[in-house]
Image (spheres, coloured by chain):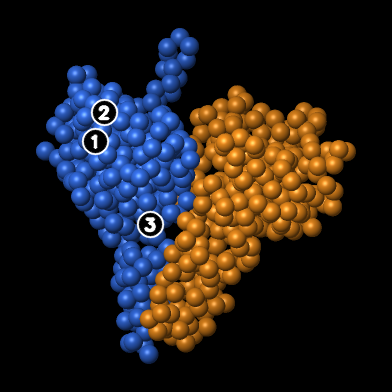
């Protein structure tokens, strides 16, 4: 079994009036099937309200299924006694770094999680050092978090999760509030954790450029998984993505426009280098 | 000239151990009807700068003139300034508070002293402008999607009919379609009503596509202030301060370095396409009608 397995997972947000009568039911997840293998880097795309964050909160057992099942590392999240184990398997990083940092010194913030689950002091310090090193923030260990840039704060938040030694990290729009450099830092960090430590990464984002290096892309719409595939398979379907209120990277749009005008460039170009090569090849033929 | 900043300095926590100079000798002219982008890394002074423009923060030294009047004069009406310079904060949907969308949008104009009827008319117009379906007007703003909430919040500022509209990262956290909807709305307000727009953004692609002038902030100072083409020519300096050029600009530079004669000033997909078609086929398609 993979690290995450969902079968016909349903989540309904139910609104009740003062007497407890049901006022409205909104289906946020609509019979989702999902399989993630340990060590994969998965990106989830979808417009606002498509169910991405609801799914993420299930993986961390912050929400529990209305119907269907979800197993995280073989543990059923609906079972009360599994909740703590599930949360230790899957750590979460949220959008706003300022809402996730609680201590006044970087290393104390990172040590907060392990301390909370009763990790021995020596081990806490070892983990703090290792996780700050993994996100490239070790030299800021004695700094105050509020003097850091957005990208640095977000990396400290990631270190806090890494210190819990989860097998899987879910990042829910971790770059939405960051400047271009901060965005790059965070995405690079996620890839490094994936490659060097084998942590399974689930990245939720609205920036198409951040998705091109993922192993697999999942597109959600109206609570359903509507597309699944490699970034190249997904981004070669420009029209379909637009229907789901999404987009493709700028180089992919440009490659598409050039191809429509009769220039010989391949379908599903994702990276700048690919398009540069394709254009130079085309230039040699025509020139 | 609608707004002039003359050697504006701003120091946070002055004369304490936490003293930070957030703005250093900033001199700018914001012309009527311009569409301006403000970029800079986190902490570069962008938000401090825009909060000076409607008098929310008072400069430590220096002067700001609105239509020739010094806004720090004793007889200057700051309330009036705030009516005419509308500011949409980051995540403005967090500021929605009324029980219905309509009441929420009415709040601003009512606060300006307009009658209930007039405020209502303004609210209708603003909500129509942001394209919110009429059947939603009397529902709670808290039941809307993220993109819709943000449009309601922007309508709340538009209902005050500002001459200058300042938006601090209005598209953060929105999906690509939501991003385009908000920016297209702002561009339309600029085109049809001639309002001055100042857009603070972390998306170089958005800035390149929409604005006519970019102000680059770095360490509290104005580093560049020019047309997008000119500013993005300095892409290496921009990278050094945590920014970047649009993706296509990098593509064009790489092609040029490898011997293809293309226009490295291209900052949008449409411009890049036109230049590439010319380089590859010799046909000038620059005037062809291209969507985005």
Q: Do the residues labelled 2 and 3 touch (CB within 8 Å)?
A: no
Distance between mark 2 and mark 3 Cα atoms:
34 Å
Near mark 2 (Cα within 10 A), the count class, few <14, some 14-19 or many ≥20, is: many
Residue A80, above or below A183: above
Near mark 1 (Cα within 10 A), the count class, few <14, some 14-19 or many ≥20, is: many
For this orientation, the residue located farthest to the top is A19
Q: Which of A170 and A15 is in front in this view?
A: A170
Q: Are marks 2 and 1 in contact (CB under 8 Å)?
A: yes
Reading the image, the residue beneath label 1 is A127
Reading the image, the residue beneath label 2 is A114
Name the residue at 72% across, 43% down.
B59
Q: Which chain carries label 2?
A: A
Near mark 3 (Cα within 10 A), the count class, few <14, some 14-19 or many ≥20, is: some
Letter of the orange chain = B
Name the residue at 25% across, 56% down.
A230
Reading the image, the residue beneath label 3 is A209
Report whether mark 2 lies on the same chain as mark 3: yes
Q: Mark 1 lies on which chain?
A: A
Distance between mark 2 and mark 1 Cα atoms:
8 Å
- Residue B73 horizontal/vertical position (percent): 85, 42
Dot placed on the residue nearer the N-terminal end, 3 or 1: 1
Residue B108 appears in view: yes
Dot placed on the residue nearer the N-terminal end, 2 or 3: 2
Q: Which chain carries label 3?
A: A
Describe the element under mark 2 as helix, strand or loop.
helix
Q: Please state if A253 lies on the left or on the right of B109 as rendered.
A: left
Q: Please state if B145 lies on the left or on the right of B49 as rendered.
A: left
Letter of the blue chain = A
Closer to viewer: mark 2 or mark 3 = 2
For this orientation, the residue located farthest to the right is B75
Closer to viewer: mark 3 or mark 1 = 1
Describe the element under mark 1 as helix, strand or loop.
helix
């Amino acid at each position: 079994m993979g690290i995450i397995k969902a079968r016909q997972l349903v989540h309904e947000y139910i609104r009740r009036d003062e007497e407890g009568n049901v006022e409205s039911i909104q289906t946020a997840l609509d019979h989702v099937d999902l399989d993630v293998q340990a060590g994969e880097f998965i990106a989830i795309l979808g417009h606002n309200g498509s169910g991405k964050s609801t799914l993420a909160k299930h993986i961390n057992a912050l929400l529990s299924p209305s119907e269907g099942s979800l197993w995280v590392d073989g543990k059923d999240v609906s079972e009360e006694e599994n909740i703590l184990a599930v949360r230790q398997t899957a750590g979460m990083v949220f959008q706003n770094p300022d809402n996730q940092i609680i201590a006044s010194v970087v290393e104390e913030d990172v040590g907060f999680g392990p301390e909370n689950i009763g990790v021995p002091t020596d081990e806490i310090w070892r983990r703090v050092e290792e996780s700050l090193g993994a996100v490239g923030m070790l030299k800021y260990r004695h700094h105050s978090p509020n003097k850091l840039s957005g990208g640095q704060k977000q990396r400290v938040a990631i270190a806090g999760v890494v210190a819990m030694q989860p097998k899987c990290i879910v990042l829910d729009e971790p770059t939405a509030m960051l400047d271009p450099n901060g965005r790059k830092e965070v995405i690079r960090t996620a890839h490094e954790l994936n490659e060097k430590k084998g942590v399974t990464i689930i990245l939720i984002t609205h920036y198409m450029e951040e998705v091109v290096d993922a192993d697999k892309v999942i597109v959600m719409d109206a609570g359903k998984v509507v597309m699944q595939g490699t970034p190249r398979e997904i981004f070669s379907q420009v029209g379909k993505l637009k229907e789901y209120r999404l987009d493709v990277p700028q180089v992919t749009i440009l490659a598409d426009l050039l191809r429509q005008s009769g220039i010989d460039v391949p379908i599903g170009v994702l990276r700048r280098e690919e398009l540069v090569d394709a254009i130079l090849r085309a230039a040699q033929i025509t020139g | 000239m609608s707004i002039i900043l003359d050697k504006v300095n701003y120091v946070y926590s002055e004369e304490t151990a936490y003293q930070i100079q957030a703005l250093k000798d900033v001199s700018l002219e914001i012309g009527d009807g311009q569409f301006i982008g403000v970029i800079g890394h986190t902490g570069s002074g962008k938000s401090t700068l825009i909060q000076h423009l409607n008098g929310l923060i008072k400069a430590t030294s220096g002067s700001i003139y609105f239509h020739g009047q010094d806004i720090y004069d004793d007889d200057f009406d700051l309330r009036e300034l705030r009516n005419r310079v509308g500011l949409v904060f980051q995540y403005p949907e967090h500021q929605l508070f009324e029980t219905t969308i309509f009441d929420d949008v009415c709040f601003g104009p009512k606060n300006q002293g307009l009658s209930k009827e007039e405020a209502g008319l303004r609210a209708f117009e603003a909500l129509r402008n942001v394209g919110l379906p009429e059947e939603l007007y009397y529902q709670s703003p808290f039941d809307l999607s993220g993109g819709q909430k943000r449009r309601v919040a922007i309508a709340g500022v538009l209902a005050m009919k500002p001459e200058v509209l300042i938006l601090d990262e209005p598209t953060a956290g929105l999906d690509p379609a939501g991003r385009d909807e908000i920016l297209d709305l702002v561009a339309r307000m600029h085109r049809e009503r001639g309002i001055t727009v100042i857009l603070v953004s972390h998306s170089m692609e958005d800035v390149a596509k929409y604005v006519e002038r970019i102000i680059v902030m770095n360490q509290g100072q104005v580093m560049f202030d020019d047309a997008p083409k000119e500013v993005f020519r300095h892409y290496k300096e921009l990278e050094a301060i945590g920014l970047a050029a649009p993706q296509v600009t990098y593509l064009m530079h790489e092609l040029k370095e490898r011997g293809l004669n293309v226009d490295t000033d291209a900052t949008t997909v449409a411009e890049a396409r036109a230049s590439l078609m010319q380089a590859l086929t010799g046909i000038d398609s620059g005037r062809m009608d291209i969507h985005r």
